[in-house]
Image (cartoon, helix red, strand yellow):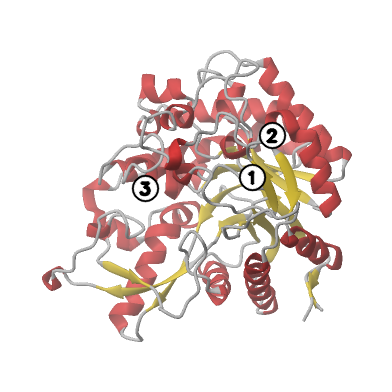
Amino acid sequence: MNSFPSDFVWGAATASYQIEGGWLENGKGLSIWDAFTHIPGKIDNGDTGDVACDHFHKFKDDIALMAQLGLKAYRFSISWSRIYPDGRNAVNPAGIQFYSNLIDELLKHDITPWVTLYHWDLPLALELELDGWRNPAMAEIFARYASTCFQHFGDRVKYWITFNEPWVVAIFGHGNGVMAPGRVSNTEPYQVAHQLLRAHGLAVEAYRRNFQPHQNGLIGITNVGDWREPLTDSEKDRESAERALEFMLGWFADPIYFGQYPACMRERVGEKLPRFSEEDMASIQGSCDFFGLNHYSTMYASHIEESEGVQIDPYANFGIAEDQDINLSSDPSWRKTHFGWNIVPWGCRKMLQWISRRYDHPEIFIMENGCSFDNELVDGQAHDPQRIDFLSGYLGECHKAIEDGVKLKGYFLWSLMDNFEWAHGFSKRFGIIYVDYPTGKRYPKESAGWYSEVIQNNGLRD
C-alpha cells in the first residue's frame, strides 16, 4: 500500500452552473452563462444549464451519496447571481438560505466544505452594465460579494477559494470567445486577468482584516497548470517549455508570490500588459494561504521562429500564440481521454515539483484532476476502467511527489458527477457518478467504488 499522509484531504469537486439548475428559481438573477448558452450555436447540441443535474433540488440526496463514498471534503462554487441577482445591490435571502442549508447538510455528514466564490458565472447585469471583468470597478464589487459570503457562511466554512482558473476566464472568455461572455481579442485577456488578480487581492484583504481573525479559516486561489515538457534537450526548447508554464500558471501565481508578472511576459507583451500600483501589490502579494492547482494534461513545447512561417491558431495554443513563440505537440503514443487530452501521469509530478521549487515549497492542494470518458449505463451499472486507470496513474505520481518533498496536502477529484461541460454541453462525462439526464437519476460508477476504497485506505494498492 502506498499510503498518503495521515492528514491528507480526499475530496471531489463541482461548480454551480454545471450542476445546480434552478436557473430562475428563488430570486436568482441571470448569469453570463445563462445568456451565453441560449445563443444558438454556442453550445454542442444546444444544451443549457437551465436544469443541469438539478442539484438545486437534489442536494440532500447528492450529499448522502458523498457520505456513502466516504468523501472527507467537497469543493463547490457559489452562484454569485443567486446571492446578488444583479451582482451588486440587494442580497437575495433565498440564495443565502440555499447555500446555508447545503453547508449544514455537508457538516451533518462530516464532510468539510471548500467554497469557490467564482467559477465563471458572472451576474449578467455586471457584464451588460459595467463591461464585466474589463472594468477596474469590478475588483471592489467582487470583494463586497465575497464579504457577504464570509459574513453568512464563514462561521462554518474554513476553506475559501476566490477564483477558479482565472486563466480560462481571460483566454477562453475574452480571447477566443468559446466561453461566456464570448469575446474575441488579443488584448482583453491581459486586462481581464489584471482585474481578476486585483479582485482576488481585495477579497483576501477583506477576509484577513474582518473575518479570518475570529473565523480562523484559510483562503487562496486555484490556477490551472498543465505540464509543458521540452520537445528536445535544446536550450531553446527548454526555454520555450518554461515560457509556456509562465504564460499559463506564472501569469497568475507570480504576482501573488513575487509581486510582479513573469519577466518573459513583461518583455514580450509590452504595453498590452497592465501594471500594478503599489496599492494593488499591497493586497495581492502574499495573498494565498495555500496553492490551489487544477491539473489535467501534458504537452511538448518547442520554440518557433517567426521566419519559419509556422501557422498556429492564435488562440488554440493555450494562450496568445503571437506573444509566446511556442509550438505545442503530443507524443503519438500517448493515450487520450474522450476530450482528446493527453494522459501523461508523470507530467502531474513534474508540475507539482516545478511549483514547489519556484514558489518556495507552499502547501499545495490539487483542486481538480480527472478525465472524461464516454461511459454507457447498462442494467444500472457504469463500468469505467479507463477512469480508474487514469486516477491510479495520477495519484501514483502524486505519491511520488510527496516522497520527493512536495507539500501536497489534498486531492479533489473532478468531478463528483457527470455535468454540463461548458461549450461541450452534456457530451463529456467527467463524473464518478453517472447522471441519467432525462430522469436525473444518479448511478455510482465503478470508479466511485474504487475511489471510496482509496479514501478508506488513505492510499493506493501497490
Mark before the other along the chain sequence, 2 or 3: 2
Please name which of the two marks, 3 or 1, marks the residue nearer to the observer. Answer: 1
Q: Mark 2 = which residue? A: 55
| SS for dot 1 | loop
Mark before the other along the chain sequence, 2 or 1: 1
Q: Mark 1 = which residue? A: 14
Q: Is residue 358 above or below residue 197?
A: below
Residue 208: x and y, percent? 64, 38
The quadrant of the picture occupied by the N terminus is: bottom right
Q: CA distance from mark 2 to mark 1?
A: 10 Å
Q: Mark 3 = which residue? A: 171
Please name which of the two marks, 2 or 3, marks the residue nearer to the observer. Answer: 2
Please name which of the two marks, 2 or 1, marks the residue nearer to the observer. Answer: 2
Q: Is residue 348 above or below residue 374?
A: below
| SS for dot 2 | helix
Q: Is residue 452 above or below residue 27?
A: below
Q: Can the viewer see residue 197 in this picture?
A: no
Residue 18: x and y, percent? 58, 39
Q: Are marks 2 and 3 in contact (CB under 8 Å)?
A: no
Closest to the observer: 341 or 118? 341
Q: CA distance from mark 2 to mark 3?
A: 29 Å
